[in-house]
Image (tube, rainbow, N blue to C red):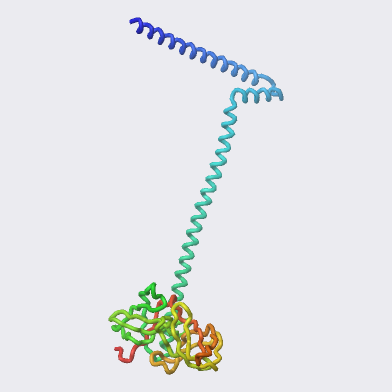
């Protein structure tokens, strides 16, 4: 009972102390507000002189320093916001311009591809008008990444008159160029062994001298021409053509150009050459396959 009475008295004393503190705080605030109001009225009533302006600034700084600092901060942040807005707008405009440039570049590449295809078709039509040979136009549909320089598969086969052993060509700058020969054919597709394959060999001659030899594939390296007589003096840039004695390929079709004349081996009776193929395997997309005589 006494403990409860003591606790109630203690609580009452704390509440009284808090009430007294709050009351003193309110009175102090009222006094400060009254002093500020009086100082403000005094400053307004006095003539506007230098010492009055200095008093006003002192009063504002001493009583409301946070207002001026807050105003300056707001002005600074407003400037930053405007700068960020301009930067964001510029970034969006730059992205839009980049997208337009990328789209224009893509359209340009597509236009170049269409023009190249159109020129290729014109070359084919011109070739058919210049020669009595009959060709099947076949597109490359398959490559083996492990044998990129060996062979390709085309979308024409025996049903279109393509037979194993038929010569395969392509067009380069309006000129017929040897690409390889068909080694196997199904009803709808055929595999073409390229001149760059290690197993490829073509009877050829060097123009204008007419020296004959055998051009063999070396994979990704330039072709190699062997069996030229040691007295033959070919030059870099001379054309290498299919030989009239070739049993597989028609004569005088461009194979490539001499890229290097190798030194003669004293133990061999011939001079070797390196030949850069006119039909690069990585550029082959359409082939002309010579139809056999028994094709219907």
Picture residue at 65% right of the left edge, 20% below the top: 43
**Furthest residue to the right?**
50
Horizontal and vertical percent position of residue 118:
44, 77
Q: Residue furthest top?
A: 2
Is 266 placed above or below 11 here?
A: below
Question: Residue lying furthest front in this view?
Answer: 267
Instruction: Establish if 166 lies above or below 8.
Output: below
Q: Quadrant of residue 120?
A: bottom left
Quadrant that contains the N terminus: top left
Image quarter hosting the C terminus: bottom left
Between 35 and 294, the residue placed more toward the observer is 294
Name the residue rendered at 40%, 76% in the picture: 285
Which residue is at a point 50% across and 52% down the rendered structure image?
92
Quarter of the image holding residue 79? top right
Instruction: Give the x, y percent position of residue 145.
Output: 39, 72
How many numbered discs, if any?
0
Q: Nearer the viewer, residue 4 or 252?
A: 4
- In the rendering, at what x and y percent does residue 192 appear? 37, 81
Q: Is 3 rendered above or below residue 211?
A: above
Q: Position of residue 6 (x, y in %)?
A: 38, 7
**Residue closer to the observer: 180 or 84:** 180
């Amino acid at each position: 009972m006494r403990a409860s009475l003591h606790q109630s008295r203690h609580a009452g004393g704390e509440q009284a102390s808090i009430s007294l503190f709050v009351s003193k705080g309110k009175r102090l605030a009222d006094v400060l507000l009254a002093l500020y109001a009086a100082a403000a009225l005094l400053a307004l009533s006095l003539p506007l002189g230098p010492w009055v302006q200095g008093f006003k600034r002192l009063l504002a700084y001493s009583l409301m320093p946070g207002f001026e600092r807050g105003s300056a901060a707001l002005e600074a942040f407003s400037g930053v916001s405007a700068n960020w807005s301009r930067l964001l707008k510029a970034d969006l405009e730059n992205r839009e311009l980049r997208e337009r440039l990328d789209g224009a570049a893509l359209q340009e590449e597509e236009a170049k591809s269409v023009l190249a295809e159109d020129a290729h078709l014109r070359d084919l039509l011109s070739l058919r008008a210049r020669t009595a040979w009959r060709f099947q136009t076949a597109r490359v549909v398959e490559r083996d990444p492990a044998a990129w320089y060996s062979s390709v598969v085309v979308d024409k086969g025996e049903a279109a008159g393509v037979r194993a052993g038929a010569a395969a060509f392509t067009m380069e700058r309006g000129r017929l160029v040897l690409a390889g020969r068909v080694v196997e054919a199904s009803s709808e597709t055929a595999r073409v062994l390229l001149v760059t394959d290690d197993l490829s060999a073509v009877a050829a001659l060097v123009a204008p001298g007419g020296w004959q030899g055998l051009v063999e594939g070396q994979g990704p390296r330039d072709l190699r021409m062997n069996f030229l007589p040691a007295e033959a003096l070919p030059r870099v840039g001379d054309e290498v053509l299919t030989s009239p004695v070739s049993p597989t390929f028609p004569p005088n079709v461009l194979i490539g150009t001499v890229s290097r004349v190798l030194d003669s081996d004293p133990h061999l009776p011939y001079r070797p050459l390196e030949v850069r193929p006119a039909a690069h395997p990585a550029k082959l997309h359409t082939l002309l396959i010579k139809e056999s005589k028994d094709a219907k």
